[in-house]
Amino acid sequence: MKPGLIPPILLLLATATHGDASSERAERYRESGMDYATGLWQSLDGSPEDETRAKAGDALNYRIRERAIRETEAVLAARKDAGIRRDLLKRLSSLHEQQSALASRRPDLQNREQVVRKHLLSAIRSLETLQREFPGWKADVVLFAIAENHAALGNHASAERYYKEVIARFSKSPILADALLAMGNLQFEKQRFALARAHYRKIFQTPERNLHPFAHYKIAWAFFNEQDTGSAVASLENAVLESRKLQSETANRKLGVEDEALADMVLFFAEAGRTKEAEDTFNRLVDGTKARELRFSLSRRLYDHGKHALAKQVAQDLLRDNPLPDQVNRLYLIVMNSAERMNDRDVSLKTAQELTSWMKEQKLAKEDTGRVETEEYLRHYSQKLHYEAETLKKKELWGQAERSYEIYLDAFQEDTEVAEVKFRYAVLLMHQKNHTKAWKTITESLAAMDAQHKRHYEAMKLRIQSIEFATRKEREQIGEANLILAYDQFAGAYPQDKLAVEAEFKAANIARGVEGPERAAVRYRGIAERNPKHDLAKEAVAEGLAALVKSEKWETLREETRAYGKSEALATDLFGKNADLGRRLKDAEELALVKIAETHEKSGQWEAAAKVYAEYAESGEVPAKIRLHSLIRMADITEQKIGDLDAAISHLQKIRDLFPDSKEGQGANLEVARLYEKTGRPRLAAEHYLKFGGEGKGKKEIQSLVNAVAILEGLGMNAEAADLFFRLSALQAPSSQEYYQAGCTNALLASAAGREQRLLEKVLECSERLKRGPEALAWAARKAWALEQLDRKEEARAAWVAIATAKHKGAGEVERLYITQAGLRALEDEFSRFSKIRFAEKNEKPAANIQKKTQALDMLERSVKRLAGTGTKKQMVEAQKYVKLAYLDFAETMETAALPSRLTEPERDEVKKTFLGFAQDFRAKAETLDAAVEAALERAPASEKRQDQAAETMSLPKTDPEAIPRILESISKKANDPEAWGQYAAYRFEEGDYAEARYYLNVWRKMSAGKKSSLGPAMETLQTMLNEKIPAVDPVVQDLI
């Protein structure tokens, strides 16, 4: 229960009462309306939710009481009845007291102190009015309440006056004891301890037994403040005995002040330093467990008061007297701290050892509070001793500090701070020149920390120092490999540190004997590459080369010199500034190459020899002629001796790139493309032909572009071929017109495949340029076709009409298709004119109108008949479509035709019937027209029938996918093997790459010309199937078929 929720009158009476006096007092409180605290009491557990609810409840209660106060004041002002006014005044004073209590608990309330004071003053005024108007009604309660409110306001003089009046006038009152207690408290606050005791003692003369223990308790504090410890302890003992008597009578453990008295007894004994008397008193008053608790509290209190000898003695005595488990570690710490304060280091260390031994025996959990507290103390303890040893420089202090570290580490091997403690311990061991143990300890410390640990850098350095400062015997025990590891890990963790390079260099020096010269050489090179500007870089290069030359490791020497040559940083910052070092590296490289090449060439080991030449060729230090010769020899060996055409290509590319202005370099450029073409990689060949051709500034460049465009065209890459043909045409070569026409053809083929706007517009450009050539009609049709693809319908129609109306002499089969298509486009206009002849609204001369539409139909039919004899099946169907549409249109016209207005009704019926008969005949003709078209198609020439029916019955032998690598290798190694080319052509067809299949098939034909081949029938089948997949016809014609 929180005292703040209870009005002043009940603060000391919150516990249950007993006896007649207590019952009467409680009843009088209830009658006075002063028991409201029970209604406001809440049991809170301190959670955030409870606190929120409590604040909300206080705010709500505050608002309720504000409203109740206003309503009560309003009623009180209106009522004159004595009984009612008495109750209202009593109620109003209670409401104000309640509101002051609520206001004191609301930190959110503005001017809270003023609000509290206002309500207390209002309560006093209400009580004074109650006393004035009803002087005989419960005067003791009213006066006591006024006194309590004055005390709450801090008006002690007024409060004392009212308390005295209650004591003087109401000796039989049940609240007399409360008044005496309040008076004693006022005197106590004024430090009038004798007067306070006098008032407290008078409580014993009242029947209020519940307050007797508290009176003894207050008397004890009065004696204690007068420094009369003996009397104070005796009074506390009386308080304990009175409390127990009261509890035994009521069976209520909550009555009395036993716990408070015992706790304060500890304080009194500690202040007086009377430890033996305290132990005897505790043993006399309480059982053994409680006595040990009090002795533990006494030890802590003595230590807190600076009485370390007494604290240490009490703690040691209690440790020998079976203390409670949760007290043991704290007792040990009290002993240790007290011993430290008394400069008794031996006892302190001995106690620390005893404490850790006890902890291990108890197997305390890592998160145990006592263990955590002990760990932290011993950690700081070892640091303290270490600091003293370093500061005072005394031998015995070094030993004590070492022992403290050993005690800690023996007990806390896996705690989070063990890395820090081991680091400090290693530092201490270094001071004692115990390098072997220091190395072991600092290594364990590093294993327990990560790179972000605040001690990581210092620990890394300390580990190195522990070995470097060690004697030869100590280093033998540690091992050279561990020293290398220490250097490596430091340099790896802190590469930018100024000591990192030195650590790496020392590791490399040791590695020559431990890891061997080859591994050491790699280490030396790493130093130079990472730190080319460092003073040790030059020395590292020299040491690394010397180690390999001395050990005759020529292969490794070659690799190392090659690696040095690849580094741009070394070339600029190291070899560029140290000419002698550069010459030394060059000499080492040439020495290695010569030693290796001498053996391979003489023994006919071509691959090994080529490898050596490659090293020579790649060296930037050897003369240019030697490098060029090496590359030529490598290309020759790999192509002629080894048969590795890919390697030959690589060498030729190097000749081309490294010596572009030489005769060999220029020849190598074309050779690379030739070998790609030879080894069945046409796309790469075309790419390299294009690279060499560039802008086509010379004959060789133009020829290279010609070779490239031939490959592109053969692969069906028509868009790329078209662009390249146009480039060749622009170069004003002898065949520029031929190139332009080829470009147009490829643009046409490419636009048919993708309908790309850029290519279609190029077709239009070609049509304009070639409209007077031998293919003028074809290009006019292609122009109209391209305009249609670009959705330029009006221009396309005009182009087709121009073809249809022009005269064409000696037109071939394909040209006739163009002319027929133009005629079809003209039919659209003719049909449009025909369909506009309608007489649905006015038809006074039906015969003339029908004759006019009939003549238009005859003209349309004649046009269709003329076209049907020259076009393809598709065009025939298209032409007949217009006839069918004309029939249906004529039928609809007759069905909707108007009737002459002059006719009588019977005549009109007869004419309408005639019109419908015409319509029925035309619809019948439209239905029979489809059958006639099919019959005509059956009579079409065989040359117009599709070949896909025959192609569907053809098939190729399936190629095993696992055989493809072998086939490709055969093409690469044996470029003149036609069987491999043919098999790969069939495989590309199976994969759906018809353009490449055609390319490889053409190569097969060239290789197999004049020779018998087992693949002959299959290749013919492949050719037929390719003709179906890639028709070799004009795409405009293809659209018409």
Image (cartoon, grey):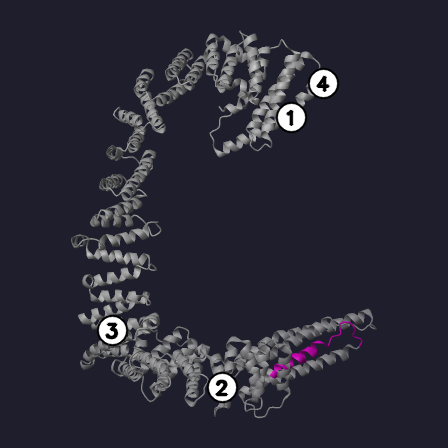
Pick out the residue farthest to the left: 473
* Element type where label 3 sits in the image: helix
Q: Earlier in the sequence, mark 2 or mark 4?
A: 4
Residues at circles 4 and 1 in contact by the CB criterion of under 8 Å? no
Alpha-carbon span between mark 4 and mark 1: 17 Å
The residue wearing badge 1 is 67
Q: Is 456 left or right of 52, judged from the image as shown?
A: left
Magenta span: helix, strand or loop, mainly? helix
Amino acid type, mark 3: Arg
Q: Is 90 left or right of 915, judged from the image as shown?
A: left
Task: Give me the disc on residue 558.
Answer: 3
* Element type where label 2 sits in the image: helix
Total numbered labels placed on residues in the image: 4
Q: Earlier in the sequence, mark 4 or mark 1?
A: 1
Please name the residue shown 47% across and 31% down the image: 46
Image coordinates for residue 293, horizontal then vertical, percent: 33, 23
Image coordinates for residue 11, horizontal then vertical, percent: 51, 19
Using the image as rendered, state which of residue 228 and residue 1000 is in the foreground: 228
Q: Is 339 left or right of 761, judged from the image as shown?
A: left
Discs 2/4, front:
4
Magenta residues span 822-844
Residue 867 in view in this figure:
yes
Is 830 contained in the magenta span? Answer: yes
Amino acid type, mark 2: Ala
Is 969 contained in the magenta span? Answer: no
Q: Residues within 10 Å of mark 1 (few under 14, many from 20)?
A: few
Task: Give me the disc on residue 742.
Answer: 2
Alpha-carbon span between mark 3 and mark 4: 119 Å
Q: Residues within 10 Å of mark 2 (few under 14, many from 20)?
A: some
Amino acid type, mark 1: Arg
Q: For residue 857, what is the image quadrant? A: bottom right
Image coordinates for residue 623, horizontal then vertical, percent: 29, 82
